[in-house]
Image: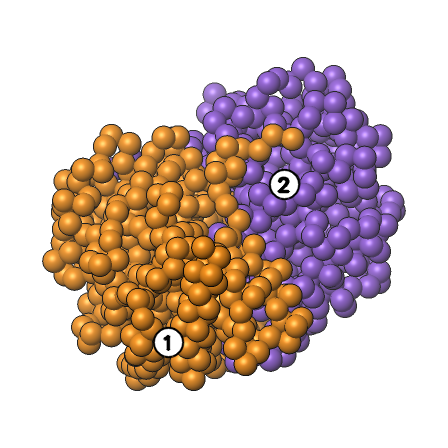
Chain colours: A purple, B orange
Amino acid sequence: MKFSKHIEACSLSPIRKFHPYVVAAEAKGRRVHHLNIGQPDIPTPPAFFDAVRNFGSAVLAYSPSPGVEVLLQAIQMYYQNIGIPLSTEDILVTVGGSEALQAVMACILEEGDEILVPEPFYPNYTTFINVSSGRVRPIPTVPGEGYRYASREKIEPLINEHTRAILVTNPGNPTGTVLTNAEKQVLVDIAKEHDLFLVSDEVYREIIYSGEALSSMLEFADAAENVVVIDSVSKRFSSCGARVGALISRNRELISHALKICQGRLCAATLDQFGAAALYQAMTPEYCAKVREEYRRRRDVVVESLSKLPGVQFSTPEGAFYLMATLPVDDADKLQSFLLKEFEDNGETVMYAPGEGFYATPGLGRSEIRIAYVTNPDDLRRSIELLGLGIAAYNQKQEAAR
Amino acid sequence: MKFSKHIEACSLSPIRKFHPYVVAAEAKGRRVHHLNIGQPDIPTPPAFFDAVRNFGSAVLAYSPSPGVEVLLQAIQMYYQNIGIPLSTEDILVTVGGSEALQAVMACILEEGDEILVPEPFYPNYTTFINVSSGRVRPIPTVPGEGYRYASREKIEPLINEHTRAILVTNPGNPTGTVLTNAEKQVLVDIAKEHDLFLVSDEVYREIIYSGEALSSMLEFADAAENVVVIDSVSKRFSSCGARVGALISRNRELISHALKICQGRLCAATLDQFGAAALYQAMTPEYCAKVREEYRRRRDVVVESLSKLPGVQFSTPEGAFYLMATLPVDDADKLQSFLLKEFEDNGETVMYAPGEGFYATPGLGRSEIRIAYVTNPDDLRRSIELLGLGIAAYNQKQEAAR
């Protein structure tokens, strides 16, 4: 049977190939520390579960396609509180930030269209873009500059008649890079001048470490036609399994087109939407500060531990809960296999996300890895220690083989 | 800003345009009876809510992309019980049947590809097919033949080098038509001979009225490469708001491609998956029989009431909870406007889904309507009575204007 070239161009998760090795290592009694998964261990606020338990209807019915009113209003109020006035009609509730991304791509892409995405980037973007007939055109960055990308010199030479949008993650996954106000202005200016959508994935908004106020690309009211924000409760409230996100834009034509997709899939999960509304209603600055401080503590542990590893290079993350590190090895993918198949220290080993999966440009990222710091500080410290021991053992073995 | 031609070719719900009239009618104190919505009033089995309440984890985490194991096993067992052996690897849990459809279309369609769909058909198919760059090629049917479509004469002349699949809803929405075994065999044979996918949307499987055993296109083990089943808990357990469906196929290449999409969107809602697993575990033949009898009672009320209306033609539905009727009016869309804006009987009026929205061929379905019999028998009886009174008043007015 024939399959579409678009799906053929997509990949299964690159982490999958390591799964049998993890199973084999665990079968030998080894403990595998996971630095590879973006699933936080922070408890979901009880307000979510309370709302779900208190759902009063005997019939779990479809909810309105754009989202339940109480959640739309809660999201509107959340933005109001960070200084951004919105109408509930600027908001569509989606099945996680993922569906918001899918919907935007379906609305703006057709065969041959390109989206500029700074690389390294969140690999699932490729799937969303490919199945909508488009393709990623990477904005190159370098680790030594902290993966910064928002400059005219880097972006404008890549724009051509096929370019439809710039897609950024801010705060960044996998880099932890946070855009400055000046950088945001540059992106907005470029989008306006070249008639591009500026799709800003802001699901890590609260997780920033430099003390600045919460911000959003939606602040640029003069770019109302261009700016599209992807949002989610997943990281904000450690509720990834709720699958409640939002597509937000003041471009009413875009919202009207995206609503067609929302109507097509009928609705997001009804109970989870009420749970999500309760999360917003129960949200306090104290809660956000506590979560942020917890991640900062973890970041500091990772930064401190990594600094001790000879030859490892990285920039200190400014936000989100990821860090890209360049390792003193030939191939982080091979190192990962070695760590799972051959290495152990006191019965323990470690797993990360190899860097190549975050690049569209072939050959890039081979010595890089993404670390997710979503576990407790003791485990993080030990994980980085294992990484250091593993690198030394791997390089020793490589040396011996020469 | 430029939008994709694929999304431009999609439509917002045709019912939407009537919304302001409904609001206005209700503001005048009128009661609008709804025959237009496929949302059953049957209570969701408490097992769903119990499972959700008993969710034990403090973190609402991502679940595995293919679905939680307990649900995959419950679906496997459900099929085992109707005589269809499956591996859990043949199943992907999806966000309702809707996402299963979207995923299949993304896997098999590219620019210029066609899907054969008997019309009238579920309008959201158009959205799923369009955004995957394909287009619907309707298999024509006629009301007088009960909208039957599964014959070589009807289908084979439509097959060309662009045809990728046949997509059927069985039992049918909006027609209530149920395929005979011989008809299913014809579809399977055509699919095999022409290397087509046979996508069978079977979300109404339990709702059949002629006493036959539950069946599925998956029974045709010799068409393992061709058959793809779309399934959902929505109608089976009156739990539309759970958004838990499944994509099922023994074609491992298709499953592997669809898994890329599932990984891209991370997972279906975690809590709802546990709820859905509990629904399957608590399912009994008595429960299914009770629901079926309730719908049969409603169908019989609608059939009896409609039979009394002069000039109204229809076939008695064999399954699902819809009926297509041909009205003695020039335009069911205009009649709907009249019913909402001008008509009332004892302060009440009625709403249905005009037939044109279920056809891809321009001009067809203008005198047809879809009735969803998902409310109680008394309301249904009154709704059909209102329809009859409305038709008479509308035609009288038309006559007077001549």
Of residues A359 and B366, the one drawn nearer to the viewer in this rendering = B366
On the same chain, marks 2 and 1? The answer is no
Of residues B117 and B372, the one drawn nearer to the viewer in this rendering = B372
Q: Which of the numbered marks, if any, corresponds to residue B319?
A: none
Q: Return the x and y of residue B91 as percentages of the image width and height.
A: 34, 56
Q: Is residue A199 at least partly visible in the picture?
A: yes
Mark 2 and mark 1: Cα distance apart in space:
42 Å
Q: Is residue A132 at least partly visible in the picture?
A: no
The residue at 47%/61% (across/down) is B400
The amino acid pointed to by label 1 is: Gln
The residue at 24%/30% (across/down) is B161
- Tell me which corner region of the image, top left, top right, bottom left or bottom right, holds residue B200: bottom left
Q: Quadrant of the N terminus of chain A?
A: top left
User: Element type at marker 1?
Assistant: helix
* Labels 2, 1: front one: 2
Of residues B323 and B144, the one drawn nearer to the viewer in this rendering = B144
Check the image and name the residue furthest to the top. Answer: A157
Q: Chain of mark 2?
A: A
Q: Residues within 10 Å of mark 1 (few under 14, many from 20)?
A: some
User: Element type at marker 2?
Assistant: helix
Q: Return the x and y of residue A144 as percentages of the image width and height.
A: 73, 25
Asked if residue A295 is positioned above or below residue A354 in the image, the reply reads below
Question: How many numbered circles are shown?
Answer: 2
Asked if residue A119 is positioned above or below residue A54 in the image, the reply reads above
The residue at 75%/20% (across/down) is A152
- Tell me which corner region of the image, top left, top right, bottom left or bottom right, holds residue B377: bottom left
Badge 2 is on which residue?
A: A254
Q: Residues within 10 Å of mark 2 (few under 14, many from 20)?
A: many
Q: Is residue A317 left or right of residue B16?
A: right
The amino acid pointed to by label 2 is: Leu
Q: Are circles 2 and 1 on residues that touch, CB within 8 Å?
A: no
Q: Which of the numbered marks, if any, corresponds to residue B281?
A: 1
